Amino acid sequence: MRDSYSNRLHNAIPGGAHTYSRGDDQYPSNAPSILKSGHGAYVLDAYDKKYLDYGMGLRSVNIGYGNKEIAEACYQEILNGNNLTRASLTELKAAELLIETIPSVDMVKFAKHGSTVTSAAVKLARAYTNRKYIAVAAEHPFFSFDDWFIGSTPLTKGIPEEMRTLTLKFNYNDDNSLKNLFEQYPDQIAGVMLEAATTVGPTNNFLHTVKDLCRQNGAVFILDEMITGFRWHLQGAQAFFDVEPDLCTFGKAMANGFAVAALGGKREIMQIGGILEEGAERVFLTSTTHGAEMSALGAFIKTIEVLKRDNVIAHFWRYGETLINEANNIATELGIADRFYLEGYPCSPNFVTKDNGGNPSLPMRTLFAQEMINNNVLIPCIAISYAHKEIELDMTLSAIKASLTIYAQALDKGTNAYLRSPVIKPVFRKYN
């Protein structure tokens, strides 16, 4: 709903939110313009209207909103001082816990958000190899808000042209596209960064091929686990796909919504950001006053405990598998199984919306999101939490059936009679 809150947000905050993924242009007009609280798998808007939520803090909340156990761990760290003059005991415990949990991690640097640690990974790769180019998977939409990445998208305003040329793109699951980059830029590519998987996972041993190509060409192999971390597997998608990166980055679901991200990796690379090697040229890796804030790291420590104790990640896979199967059965019953379906890994499903020509359709995606909201389900994406249980699954499937009934009618008669909203827009577009 477009109301006074929306106007106030845009008056005070460029874009109306502090990440573009929360912007008005990412939601149909009947979406709440502002939220005031979250509890379990639900959120409340400013008027106390309740929605079942699948955005879950842009995938950062994996246990549930307002989890008392995690909040209490956070609160105790606040009472312990939260941010001390030197490194804290909590900081050390959190670092050792991540090293213990992720086999590829020998050392770790914490920060408050993902862009900081992916950019730090790029800096380390360049420092380690004395090269300047970074190669990233073209199909993976976001790695950092910093110039090295955004300069490679259509959003180039404000970014010097020379920065835009330093990030190269290859195609996920296409060995030859990466081989060609190494041939075009011999001994010049510092690192290769990609996600282990999104909706589509690796085929034909692709991740291992990328690792081999990096080894053969002297580049650093970097896995970005912002989305996959603590959802695919407790030890990351790298464990799920049995591949070990040189560097890896985590964030989002590390601490059930609290602000913490991490860069981890092999000691020989990570330690060049250190200060102990006498006479070595320094690399100013990251330096953040709040990067090791005790409250968020306390939440991280407790989140790992809950993930292990309650076998949370297995819950994601079970819930997601049922959701995919039942939603697709509904689409089949309505005769639109080739125009709407859920796909991907059950721990992180994706819904696909197509028009009558079989083409991916933002108008149809907007219509589906609009109708789900009309049925009190907020679903910009599907991020399952431990708070999503049987009652939430039943509510979701009921909303999907009602929404797809309208969807099927719109496929037959067109969206104009049903869509009450501007069409959702891509985040990475040249113009507003």
Image (spheres, rainbow, N blue to C red):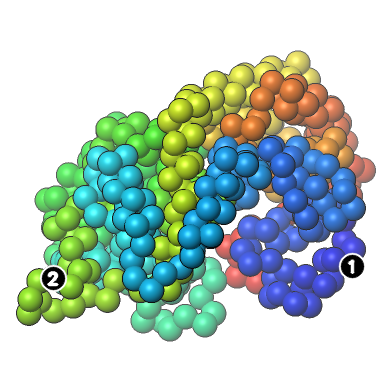
User: Quick one: quadrant of the N terminus?
Assistant: bottom right
Residue at the spot x=87%, y=45% of the render?
49
The residue lying toward the viewer, choosing from 310 and 357, is: 310
- How far is mark 2 from mark 1, CA to CA? 55 Å
SS for callout 1: helix
The residue lying toward the viewer, choosing from 6 and 201, is: 6
The numbered disc on residue 149 is: none
Say whether residue 245 is left or right of residue 18: left
Q: Which residue is mark 1?
A: 4
The amino acid pointed to by label 1 is Ser
Q: Is residue 405 visible?
A: yes
The amino acid pointed to by label 2 is Leu
Say whether residue 417 is left or right of residue 304: right
Of label 2 and label 1, which has the lower sequence position?
A: 1
Residue at the spot x=57%, y=40% of the render?
69
Position of residue 273 measured from the top left corner of the image (x, y, whole percent) = 22, 69
Badge 2 density bin: few <14, some 14–19, many ≥20, Cα 10 Å: few
Q: Quadrant of residue 403?
A: top right
Q: Quadrant of residue 400?
A: top right
Position of residue 245 measured from the top left corner of the image (x, y, whole percent) = 25, 46
Q: Quadrant of residue 55?
A: top right
In the figure, 317 relative to 107: above or below?
above
User: Quick one: quadrant of the C terminus?
Assistant: bottom right
Tag count in the figure?
2
Position of residue 390 measured from the top left corner of the image (x, y, whole percent) = 69, 21
In the figure, 153 relative to 399: above or below?
below
| Residue at the extreme right of the image, as rendered | 417
Give the foreground label among 2 and 1.
2
SS for callout 2: loop
Q: Which residue is mark 2?
A: 276
Q: Is residue 247 visible?
A: no
